[in-house]
Structures are given as structure tokens and as C-alpha cells.
Image: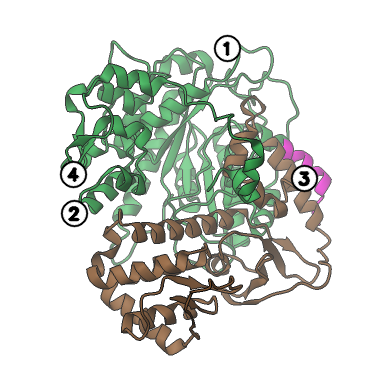
């Protein structure tokens, strides 16, 4: 049986909740939009997201397994890796059996898959905490476009809300979502920039200063472009002021 | 209004003058949250990587590169020709907050040449940091250099304002210091270091109490040693590092491969900086701090240098064949720490995971063990993961073999099956 859900965390939690309560059999595949063509003999069951079921499951995971496991589950989900839903569903199925010990079974395949993708998401979020670049726009909002593999904007928003003292906008250009923040708070939502950005008068000069600093801080005798690329992969260069 | 032309010229000169200072960590600071700009993050964040592959996490600048001293290893020595520049406290603050808001940096690293007396120089540094903290309400990370010979009062103020303080030892022995840095005196370097250690310890001890004392360098202190400019052995260098870690609770000792700077130098100029030696020293340093090794175990009077071809842990393991192979299911944590290819993290994961089942090669891989190295030293489920018999000589040869060259048999067109990003990063 193949289950189709709407691609949200609440949707996936609804699926897992139904499986846990026995109203849905253990699925063989879980698909999110855009749905691939169903096989000739596949039984496809669409499941609608239901926030009450999702909230119930969340509480149950925290109570019967552990809040940390829910954290892993959420981060693994945000990796948006194909097939991660099935790993999450099996991770929970195993979790109901072993309870709070779930995250100690490090060599079990599903636990490993969930931990591994959760770590990737966390790692990319940590990377972008450093590699996101804000630019001052003419209207005084600080704008940072990013294009991450995992859906890390929800994780990054908290970090920037804590430290920035000006209104800011973090934009996941690939997914068309963003976080808008000011005074230590933020909101998440879909985001589309229609007009050309206009930068403040000083923006270009500060960027030039940063590029100058960046060039001169390297020791020529130790030059190693390949080390630089290993730590700062080319996929992030698009919005990096110093590499453009 | 900032004069960007002038500021750019100064920044470039002072960044180039500061780049030989290795320290770039922005981690380990827990400062109470305050309103204003910036916050500390205990994990630290790297914001960029320069063309030499070193991370940039702090805006690394000198306040001034004018210096009265004539230290042979230093690019800013008074006998070296080159442009000189000095920043005002306000220029430092403007640069820091504007870079910080753009998320270019995690904070400021401020050092300086000694352009007048040590006290006057230190006072200018402290004033720049005070302006940044108090007028600009900046709560990001600040690493402040202590000037050797500065008065205790100024060291105290520096510790209150900065997240980390440091004073560089640079040369491992007093004799080398005397020869290459005749203006510096070892005691003048050690005095602020001892004072900072006492301040940090006092602030730590009172932290849990009812009325915690004001913070003092919450991220601790660090120092730097130059490698390859003087004839000291690795053993002397690591013995000094170990003493610094145990006696003044140093957070980090950085090693800097010596790069000849400027013409007319009194030092021999190696063709290339001893980068591999620097790397081995860092590996050994990690073994001292996190893996429970002592210097005497790694090096002794007969073998005062680290093996450049083999990492220090593998070299140690091969010198102690009687302890291996060890069984993953039974070996205690501290023995697992000592197996090449097993890190602190994977050792802890092994101990957690083995309570819930017997581990095999596949399971170990999932835990993050580097089987390529570790397999020769391990048995699992009663069987060796490497050879049937334990032959240290053969293992040494296998570990020294260069990694096999990437196969050329695969047609290059096949690479296009993977998404382009994975080809570039090498990630699957």
C-alpha cells in the first residue's frame, strides 16, 4: 500500500498517527507532491493532514519515546530527502517497541537513517548560520537570500532573531519561503520577490571592504583553493559577497 | 559618514599584518543575553574560508602595525619595510558592527603592534573594545590580545570586556626568545597569562553562586607557538603545551608553521612552510586534550619528533602491538579512544550501541568509525576485521600506502547520472 500526504510535517505525523493507532496498515511507500505515477498494482491511499491527530502523535512521541527523538524526526523530515518518510515511519514503529532507548540503537538501519539525515539538516543549518549574507536594502530591511538543499529556514530564523537588531528578511529562493523578523521575533511564510531589489547607499562600499579584507587575510604561501572549496562548496557561492 | 577609500586601504594593510595569527575560534562563550546587537553561540560559527583554506570567523585586525620591537619572525617588526597604518577606535567599531549585521563575521579579533609603551598600547585596545561594547551595544564575540608587559589593571579591564584573551608565547624556549625577540622578556609574557588564568578561574568558580561575579573572558585564553623557526623538537613543544593546558587552564594552543616574512631576515628561509609538521602537532595536541594521552607516551628522548608519515595515534598503536587487536564488544571506553580510526564521538557511540546488540563491520561504519584504519586493530563477533593474524609490520605498511588513485576505468559520462552538486562536493 502506498500512502500519499500533502508534504507537510503535520501530514506525515497524521499518517504515522493513523499507523500507530492501527487505522492504517504499515505502508510500503509514502509519497509527497509532486506524486510519481502509481504502479499498476499499487493500492494508493491519500491521507489528509489533520492537526489534532498530528498534535496527539507529537505528544505521544515525547511521552512514550522521548522529546529528543521528536527533534531528530523533525530535522530528518526537513532534509526533504526522497524516501525519508518511510524511514521515519519505521523509526517510530521501532520506537513504540523500545521506548526511550530508541536513540541508543545507533546501528539499527532506520535509526541510523533518521539520525544521519537529521545530522545533515543540522549541519547545513549550521553552515548557513555562517554563510548567509545580509544586504541592506534602501528601505532599511536587511535581506539575505539562500538556496539550501534541506529546508533550513525554520531552523535559521531563530538564530538570526536572537542576534539582529534591525528588521530582517531571510529568503529561501529555491522553495519560495522566507522568514521576516524584527525585535527578536519572526514569522515564517511563502515569499516571492517581484521587484528588483534596491540597496542602500553604503551597501556596495561595505561589500567592497569585505572583499578587500577577505583577499588580504589569506597567507599567499599557504594558498589552497581546494581546501577552501571543501569547506565552502561552490553551491553556496551564488549569494556569497566575497566569492561572486 | 565613513571615508570608505581610506578605510579600505587601512583594512587591507592591517588584515595582511594580522593574518599570521592563527586563532580564529568563536566558540565556548556563554555570555548572558542582553539587548542590542549580537549574541554568542557556544558552538562557534565559521563565516567564510580564505584562499588558503583557513576559516574566517572573526574580523581579524591589528589596531596598528607600527611596532617598536624587532622580532625576527614577525612581519610587523620595525626593521621590516612596508606600509604602516593605524585604526581609530571608532573605525574598528564601525567595521565590526557593519560586518556583523551583514553576517560576514562572528565578532572581532583585535591585536596590535606595540607602537608606544605596552601600557599605552593596551589602553588604546581596551578603549576600542569598550566603545564597541558600551556605545554600540555589541554583544558578539571579541578576542582581545594582551600586550606583554601591560599593567595588571589593564589586563583586568580587557578580561571583563572580551570573550577570550590571549598572549602569544611564539617561541617555545627562553633561549630562542632571547635570540629572535630581544625586546621581549619571557616573564612579561607569562605575567598577564597567569593573571588571566586566575581571573577566569575566579569568575568560573563564582558562576553557580547566588551573586555571580562579573564575567571574565568566558571563552578562556589561548596562545600560539611558531613551528619551524627555531630548532626546538616536537617533544619540547608538546611538553610546553601540556604544561599550559594543565597549569594555566589554557583553552587552546595554536601552532603556526613558520612563513618567512619580508626581506633581510635573520632567520633561515624554508622553501615551503612546514605544514605537515604543523598538522601532526595539532593531531598530537588533540590526543593530549581529548583522548587521555600523555606527552611521554607519544614522544621520548630517543624519538623527540613526531612521525611525519603516520598520524601520532597510529604510530603509538603500532609501537604497542601487545594491546591489539581489541574487541569492540568488550574494550573499555578509554581503550577504544586509543584505536586508530575511532574518534571520541564514535567510541562513545560504540559503547551506547553495543548494549543493544552485537556490532559488526557494517554497524561500526554506521557509527562513524573509519574502518579503513580501525579494522586492523579490531575484532568483532569473535573475528578480526582485518587480517586473521595480528601483524603490526604489515599494518604499518598498509597504513603508509598511498590511497589508490581514482579509477580511470569509469567513463566520465557516467558522472552525469548524479546531480551536479554531488559531483562538486563529492557528497552522495
Q: Position of residue A206 (x, y in %)?
A: 76, 52
Give whichever of discs 3 and 2 has the lower sequence position: 3
Closer to the camera in the image, A183 or B423: B423
Q: Callout 1: few (<14), some (14-19), or many (20+) C-alpha neighbours within 10 Å?
A: few
Q: Callout 3: few (<14), some (14-19), or many (20+) C-alpha neighbours within 10 Å?
A: some
* Mark 3 or 2, closer to the camera: 2
Q: Callout 4: few (<14), some (14-19), or many (20+) C-alpha neighbours within 10 Å?
A: many
Give whichever of discs 4 and 1 has the lower sequence position: 1
How far is the residue under mark 1 from the one under mark 3? 33 Å
Q: Position of residue A72 (x, y in %)?
A: 40, 65
Residue at 43% x, 68% y: name it: A86
Give whichever of discs 2 and 4 has the lower sequence position: 4
State the predominant SS element of the stretch in magenta. helix
Whether residue B406 is visible here, answered yes or no, is: yes
For chain A, what colour was chosen?
Answer: brown
Residue at 62% x, 34% y: name it: A226
Same chain for marks 1 and 3? Answer: yes
Residue bearing the label numbered 2: B355
Describe the element under mark 1 as helix, strand or loop: loop
Residue at 28% x, 44% y: name it: B347
Give whichever of discs 3 and 4 has the lower sequence position: 3
How far is the residue under mark 4 from the one under mark 1? 53 Å
For chain B, what colour was chosen?
Answer: green
Residue bearing the label numbered 3: B7
Dividing the picture into quarters, in which one does residue A157 lie? bottom right
Q: Quadrant of the N terminus of chain B?
A: bottom right
Residue bearing the label numbered 4: B329
Name the subunit of mark 2. Answer: B
Amino acid at each position: 500500500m502506498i500512502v500519499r500526504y500533502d508534504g507537510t510535517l503535520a501530514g506525515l505525523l497524521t499518517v504515522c498517527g493513523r499507523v500507530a493507532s492501527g487505522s492504517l496498515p504499515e505502508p510500503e511507500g509514502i509519497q509527497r507532491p509532486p506524486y510519481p505515477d502509481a504502479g499498476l498494482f499499487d493500492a494508493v491511499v491519500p491521507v489528509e493532514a489533520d492537526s489534532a491527530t498530528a498534535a496527539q502523535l507529537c505528544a505521544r512521541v515525547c511521552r512514550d519515546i522521548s522529546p529528543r527523538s521528536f527533534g531528530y524526526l523533525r530535522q530528518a523530515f526537513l532534509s526533504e530527502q526522497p524516501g525519508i518518510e518511510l524511514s521515519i515511519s519505521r523509526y517510530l514503529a521501532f520506537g513504540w517497541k523500545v521506548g526511550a532507548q530508541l536513540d541508543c540503537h545507533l546501528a539499527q538501519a532506520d535509526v541510523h537513517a533518521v539520525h544521519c539525515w537529521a545530522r545533515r539538516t543540522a549541519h547545513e543549518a549550521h553552515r548557513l548560520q555562517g554563510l548567509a549574507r545580509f544586504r541592506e536594502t534602501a528601505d532599511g530591511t536587511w535581506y539575505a537570500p539562500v538556496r539550501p538543499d534541506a529546508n533550513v529556514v525554520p531552523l535559521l530564523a531563530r538564530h538570526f532573531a536572537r542576534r539582529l537588531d534591525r528588521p530582517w528578511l531571510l529568503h529561501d529562493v529555491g522553495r519560495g519561503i522566507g522568514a521576516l523578523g524584527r525585535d527578536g521575533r519572526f514569522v515564517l511564510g511563502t515569499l516571492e520577490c517581484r521587484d528588483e531589489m534596491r540597496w542602500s547607499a553604503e551597501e556596495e562600499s561595505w561589500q567592497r571592504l569585505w572583499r578587500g579584507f577577505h583577499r588580504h587575510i589569506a597567507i599567499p604561501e599557504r594558498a589552497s583553493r581546494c581546501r577552501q572549496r571543501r569547506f565552502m562548496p561552490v553551491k553556496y557561492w551564488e549569494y556569497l559577497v566575497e566569492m561572486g | 559618514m565613513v571615508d570608505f577609500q581610506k578605510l579600505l586601504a587601512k583594512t587591507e594593510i592591517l588584515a595582511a599584518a594580522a593574518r599570521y595569527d592563527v586563532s580564529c575560534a568563536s566558540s565556548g562563550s556563554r555570555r548572558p543575553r542582553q539587548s542590542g546587537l549580537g549574541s554568542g553561540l557556544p558552538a562557534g560559527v565559521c563565516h567564510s574560508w580564505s584562499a588558503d583554506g583557513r576559516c574566517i570567523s572573526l574580523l581579524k585586525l591589528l589596531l596598528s602595525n607600527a611596532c617598536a620591537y624587532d622580532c625576527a619572525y614577525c612581519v610587523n617588526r620595525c626593521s621590516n619595510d612596508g606600509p604602516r597604518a593605524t585604526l581609530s577606535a571608532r573605525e574598528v567599531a564601525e567595521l565590526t558592527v557593519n560586518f556583523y549585521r551583514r553576517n560576514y563575521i562572528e565578532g572581532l579579533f583585535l591585536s596590535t603592534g606595540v607602537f608606544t609603551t605596552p601600557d599605552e598600547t593596551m589602553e588604546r585596545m581596551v578603549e576600542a573594545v569598550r566603545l564597541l561594547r558600551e556605545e554600540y551595544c555589541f554583544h558578539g564575540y571579541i578576542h582581545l590580545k594582551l600586550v606583554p608587559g601591560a599593567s595588571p589593571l589593564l589586563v583586568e579591564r580587557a578580561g571583563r570586556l572580551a570573550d577570550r584573551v590571549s598572549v602569544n608565547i611564539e617561541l617555545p624556549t627562553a633561549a630562542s626568545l632571547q635570540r629572535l625577540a630581544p625586546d621581549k622578556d619571557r616573564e612579561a609574557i607569562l605575567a598577564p597569562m597567569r593573571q588571566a588564568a586566575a581571573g577566569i578561574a575566579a569568575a568560573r568558580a563564582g558562576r553557580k553562586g547566588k551573586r555571580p561575579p562579573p564575567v571574565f573572558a568566558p571563552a578562556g585564553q589561548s596562545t600560539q607557538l611558531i613551528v619551524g623557526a627555531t630548532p626546538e623538537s616536537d617533544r619540547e613543544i608538546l611538553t610546553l603545551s601540556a604544561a599550559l593546558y594543565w597549569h594555566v587552564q589554557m583553552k587552546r594552543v595554536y601552532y603556526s608553521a613558520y612563513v618567512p616574512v619580508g626581506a633581510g631576515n635573520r632567520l633561515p628561509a624554508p622553501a615551503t612552510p612546514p605544514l605537515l609538521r604543523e598538522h601532526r602537532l595539532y593531531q598530537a595536541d588533540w590526543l593530549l586534550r581529548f583522548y587521555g594521552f600523555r606527552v611521554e607516551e607519544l614522544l621520548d628522548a630517543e624519538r623527540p619528533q613526531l612521525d611525519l608519515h603516520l598520524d601520532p595515534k597510529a604510530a603509538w598503536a603500532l609501537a604497542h602491538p601487545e594491546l591489539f587487536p581489541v574487541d569492540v564488544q568488550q574494550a573499555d571506553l578509554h581503550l577504544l579512544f586509543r584505536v586508530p580510526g575511532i574518534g571520541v564521538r564514535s567510541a562513545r557511540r560504540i559503547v551506547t550501541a553495543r548494549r543493544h546488540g552485537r556490532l559488526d563491520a557494517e554497524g561500526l561504519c554506521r557509527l562513524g568509525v573509519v574502518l579503513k584504519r580501525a579494522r586492523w586493530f579490531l575484532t568483532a563477533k569473535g573475528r578480526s576485521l582485518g587480517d586473521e593474524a595480528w601483524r603490526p609490520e604489515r599494518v604499518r605498511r598498509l597504513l603508509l600506502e598511498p590511497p589508490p588513485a581514482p579509477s580511470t576505468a569509469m567513463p566520465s559520462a557516467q558522472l552525469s547520472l548524479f546531480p551536479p552538486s554531488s559531483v562538486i562536493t563529492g557528497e552522495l
